[in-house]
Amino acid sequence: MASGSDHGLKRIVWKKIKDTIITDCRNSEVWKILILDPFTTKLLSSCCKMSDLMSEKITIVEDLFKSREPVPEMKAIYFISPTAKCVDAFIADFKTKPKYKAAYVYFTDYCPDELFNNMKLYCAKYIRVCKEINMSFMPQEAQVFTCDNPGAFQSIYSPNSQDKMNTLETMADQLVSLCATLDEYPGVRYKKDANMENAKTLAELVDDKLAKHYELDDSGKKKGKTQAQLLIVERGFDPVSPILHELTYQAMAYDLIDIQEDTYKYKAEDGPEKEAQLSEDDQLWIKLRHKHIAEVAEQIPKLVKEIAASKKKPDGKITIANLSQMMKKMPAFRKQMTEKKVHLHLAEDCMKHYSNHVEKLCKAEQDLAVGSDVEGLKVKDAMRTLLPVLLHPYNPPDKIRAVLLYIFSLSGTTTENLNKLIQHVKIEDQQEFILNWKALGVPIITSPSFFSRKPTRRDRSQEDSYNLSRWTPVIKDVMEDAVENKLDTKEWPHLSESPAAWNGSGAVSARQKHKTSSQDERRTGSRLIVFVVGGMSYSEMRCAYEVTQTVKSCEVIIGSSHILTPTGLLNDIKALSKAPSKAPMETFTIEERSNA
């Protein structure tokens, strides 16, 4: 039996697909066709391979919206989103001349009555099964999920948005589907902030929808809260982390190198351009992605040497048995070697950028973000830290990032000062890169008398860190405080009762050596789910793994509408002041489902 992906969320999603969709259809020995829409294609690709489907007697995978040849002797499985567009395409397959012998229909989420009735009207005699399986989120990594909706940023934060509530409603449904897939009924909390109301709105929607979803379980009893907590924050809560130049491998690669759809393109020494997928099927990627680039650059050449050494045949006679063993090991050897070569290229690419300009930028960025220098001395004059960056011939995006960090460090600046900075960076015609942050609730312009109280950060002075990587994303403080039951209830109100495992004190410190206590035993197997409205950065994703690794009794999962890169975020910020586009959004699945 094929196992699909063996990593966390992806494994859970694949198991649920097998236990529902595949099991229903397994009774028959007939080979089947699987029909997917763009969202479910991406979902299935994230957690299984074609060989996994073949082993479950699925012989063909087709696109719902493409022209398909009828196969009237075969049964078809439809795994689709509950949108008018998908349902119309399904009806078209059976309305006049049926394309298939029968249909097994599975929706990713709740299907509105109107669409369901349309299906019954035209296709009732062909439908063998019709189920809603609650799986409308995208598992990105073992502990990371998204709503697969980058367009949500504009929908939520653009002053011209027409569909903000629709987008938040859809997001709430997707969060409920995540909880249902994990079989969790969490307590819900949000970060209270007068300038950021979306976290509260989304938290209320999720709490209400969870209560309705879990009103009755399969045995007719009301499901109680599980050992899980869901925290909802907004992007403006920490504007620094997605803007800084990060020096851990994954975050750095996605910032500095043009990696599209997780595909890294590189040129071999003497050959054509090659492509490599950066995914959890690559064991070396899993091992290296959260390490500092200095460690990665040191480790990869060693690994390549080890592999090369192991390739040399041992001394002694070469027998048929020896040759047979060597041939059996060759595919695994080739795969290992390819992985190492890919990372050798990727790490070299990262280091080139680092040596060219990033290294010099990082010192100023870290001082502005942390508020002190390497020696721990407080930065008294942030402008003095910023000035060398402005005077150096860096490209405009890098200067914009430094200016933003300067403004964030002061919790805003005066109009006069901002105008001077804009002239310095020569972006008079592109001020939106800076000014539009106010739409996220981040102070950009303040009066000289304005005083903003900065949140207290955890003391990490005793932790090992590289001089140019001293900043820790604020979300890590939140994760650690949540696990230790130290979140202030005024700042993080509960929307419903908190599960028993998250009450009381005596929780484990996320920084100290793990010790077992009754609290830990109660919480073993518990989950902390953190959701960021408006996109999450790779450095924040890393924090979920780091805290889980330290606090063995609790798994931390992080999610958002989408994953951010600094360039992508800046472009999104700039686009906030554009008039709404009349063209349909690219992320049609989410958009359509909002209207369905």
Image (cartoon, rainbow, N blue to C red):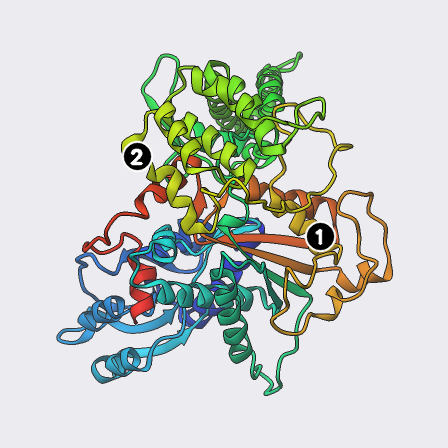
On screen, 52 above or below 32? Answer: above
Disc 1 + disc 2, Cβ < 8 Å: no
Q: Mark 2 is on which residue type?
A: Gln
Q: Which residue is mark 1?
A: 481
Q: Is residue 486 above or below residue 502?
A: above
Q: Amino acid at mark 1?
A: Asp
Where is 447 relative to 393, above or below? below
In the displayed structure image, the side of residue 82 where residue 462 appears, left or right: right
Q: Quadrant of the C terminus?
A: bottom left
Establish if 292 lies above or below 453.
Answer: above
Residue 137: image quadrant is bottom left
Is residue 57 visible in the rendered structure shown here?
yes
| Viewer-side residue, 150 vs 578 | 578
Residue 315 location (% of width, % of height): 66, 12
Q: Nearer the viewer, residue 127 or 565?
A: 565
Element assignment for label 2: helix
Q: How dense is the environment of label 2, judged by Cα within 10 Å: few (below 14), some, or many (20 and up)?
A: few
- 347 horizontally vs 543: left or right: left
Furthest toward the bottom, the residue is 220
Quadrant of the image occupied by residue 308:
top right
Question: Could you say where residue 29 lies in the image, as x and y percent from the top left?
Answer: 40, 68
The residue identified by callout 2 is 430
Pinpoint residue 291: horizontal percent, then vertical percent: 61, 30
Image x and y of residue 492, in percent: 63, 61
Q: Nearer the viewer, mark 1 or mark 2?
A: 2
